[in-house]
Structures are given as C-alpha cells and as structure tokens.
Amino acid sequence: MCAARLLVDVHTHVYLPRYATMLRSRAAVPRIIPWTGGEERLLILDHEPSGGRPVGSQYWDREEKLKFMDRHGIDVSVVSTANPWLDFLSPTQAQEMATELNADLEEYCSTGPAIPDSTTKRLYGFGLLPLVPTVSVDALLENVKQIAAAPHLKGLIMGTRGLGKGLDDEALDPVWAAIEAAGLVIFLHPHYGVENSAFGEKENGHVLPLALGFPFETTIATTRLILSGVFDRFPDLRLLLAHSGGALPALSSRLASCIDHDPLVAARLKHDARYYVGKLYLDAVSYGPEEMGFTSEVLSRAARYKDITPSKMIANRSEGSKRMLFGTDHPFFPPLNSVEKWKSVVENLEAIEDVQGWSDADKEGVRGANAVSLFSL
Ligand code: URA
Ligand code: ZN
C-alpha cells in the first residue's frame, strides 16, 4: 500500500477509443456526430439540448488524462467509462463490448506510468458489466470474474437500470454475491435523471438534468436498494455513490421515519434506514464545504446508528469523512473560458480544505488516504 500523501480522483471518466468509435457509428443517441470546424459533439441524454456537448481527445486520450492530472496535482485516478455505458446494446453486443472494454481499461492502466519511486500506478479503473435486459446472469458473473482478475481494475461502474427493472431486482442477487466475494467496489452513477416533463419547457441547457436529475436518480436507486434488503443479504457490499449520494444524506431520517410508519415495510429491514446510509461511500463532488460537512455529519451519525439513539448522538464529522473521497467528474464540466485550473476541480479541493470540524488528517483522508485504503492502492 502506498504510504505517501496522495491526491486521488475516484470520479473521473473516459470513453475508451473502442467506445468512441462505436458512438461515432451510431445513427441514434447515444452518439458522437461531426460538428462545424472539424469538431465533434457528444449526444447522450434523451432530451439533449441542441448540439449536445463538445467532445474531443480529453475523453479518450490517456495523455490528456495525465496532463489534466498533472495540472491539478492529481497523483492517481480511478477511471471509469462515462454514461450511458452499455445500456443501449443487445445482450450479445453488450457482453462482447464489456469484455473488450475491460481488457482495454486494464491495459490503459497497466501500461501507464507509476508514481515516482513507487509501485503504485497513476491509473486504476472501474470495469463494466453488460447490464442489459435478458442478458444471462452467467454472462454477468463472467465479467465480474474478469474484473476481479484484472490487477488494475478495483471495482465496476454501474448505472441504475440493472436488468431493466432497477437495482432492487432479486435477479441481481448472484451478482451482488459475486461482487461482494471478490471485494470489488461498485461505483453507482446516474444517467437517466428524472422524468423530463418535471423540468418544464424553458431552455436551461444541461443545468436541470445534471444538477437535479442526476442526483435524484442516484437517491432513488440507492433508496430502493436499501428497501430491498440488499445490504442485509450482502452486508460487505461496498457501494460508492456519485455526486455525494445526491439527496440521500438530507433525506435519510425522513426515509427512516416513512419506513417506521409503513405497515408493509416497517418489519422488513434488520436495521434503521440510517444504518445503511452509514455503510455507503460517497464521492466529495458537491462543490461546497457546508454540504461536505453536513454529509459527513450524517454519515457519522449513521455509522453509529446501531448502538446509540439519535438524541444521544454527538455530531462527529470526522468519522463520516472517512467514507468520503475526492473526485472531479473530468472531462465533464470543463471551464467556459480558458484557464490553467478547472473550477470544477479547484472548488472541490477548496471545499475539502474549508470544512468546519475536519482535522488535517480528515482532509488528507478525503483527498486521498480514504481511497488508498478503500482500493488498496
Ligand atoms: N454529464 C454526464 O453526462 N456525465 C457525467 O458524469 C457528468 C456530467
Ligand atoms: Zn460522472
């Protein structure tokens, strides 16, 4: 395990060349299309504002990822394929792509540089499963095995659809069991947002789907997982939530109360809902010290929920900070004007520095030590 103080980015994406080539070949969203001046555009959301988003080598070129890391002092990145993964493919195509992309990502990481004077690499990855309707569970297990055997893949990124019925589908139980047994970390990431009609008819660019739709989707998917008893059946499952778990930290006591008052659900779970929230890992991609501090406080309380009643708890942000990990969401959220450092990175680093109640060791943890430990880097 690497002992040096490291800045580790656990939320950073890539469209590997093989994936980008597939997106270019498609006639429907998700796709990459030619744009004016020899540029290309990325269209991945269902109701993408006209023109989508500019896309370029920062999405697929490893040298660009490393340059970005160097520019922001990031030592290690745990890289994941960006949404929408393989969700739109047939089972056969998804299986083939998952296997090839996992091999590509292992090579991307293993043939990349190491940290000077260390055996720790600068790039690790989250693999992919072919999570599409009608794929066989055996096929999913094959890819779990492939990822577990790849030395530089530390987990897998997953959307919220599962096999089409969501992540609370019991058909996924053998997959959770295999992931838990292999000690892989699941990085749960949104793509679909919420029903688009909720956002009205005004043109607000990508703001509403990204700021609200994404985190609400994660909140709902994780709540459904908790309600399904997955964490009772698989207590060692390690789940890392994108965007600091969306609204879940703010809603966890309301969720617990709604469960307690629902005759259908009240006796279903072994623990109070807040206990399960305390078992989650959250990225620190929330851009504000108040939000990070609050989230760590909720996690601290939840982590001790089994042993102590809420009124007896003393907020201890330090404990919760150990489950939070720095991320950037690169190459999304590039600055609108040319600047040396990206605001989306600097803001998260400054927020970590400014959280009230976090010691220097807590901040060091969120910046990198927690990731070193979670991923055994
Ligand atoms: N937009 C996306 O589509 N995905 C991300 O991960 C971030 C922004
Ligand atoms: Zn992301």
Image (cartoon, helix red, strand yellow):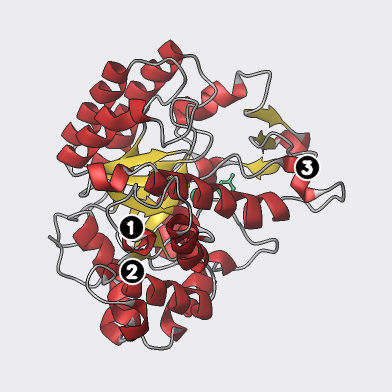
Which of the 4 quarters of the picture holds residue 80? top left
Front position among marks 2 and 3: 2
Against 358, residue 66 (above or below) is above
Sequence order check: which comes first, mark 2 or mark 1? 1
> Which residue is denoted by mark 2 in the rendering?
302
Q: Nearer the viewer, residue 285 or 60?
A: 285
Asked whether the beta carbons under mark 2 and mark 1 sit within 8 Å of each other, the answer is yes
- The CA span between labels 2 and 1 is 7 Å
Q: Is residue 60 visible?
A: yes
Residue 112 seen anywhere in this rendered image of the structure: no
Chain-order first, disc 1 or disc 3? 3
The residue that mark 3 highlights is 197
Taking depth in this image into account, of 183 and 17 the one nearest to the observer is 183
Identified at 35% across, 66% down, the residue is: 324
What amino acid is found at the position of numbered circle 3 in the picture? Ser
Amino acid residing under circle 1: Tyr
* Residue 276 circle label: 1
Compare marks 2 and 3 and give the one earlier in the sequence. 3
Q: Is residue 200 above or below residue 293?
A: above
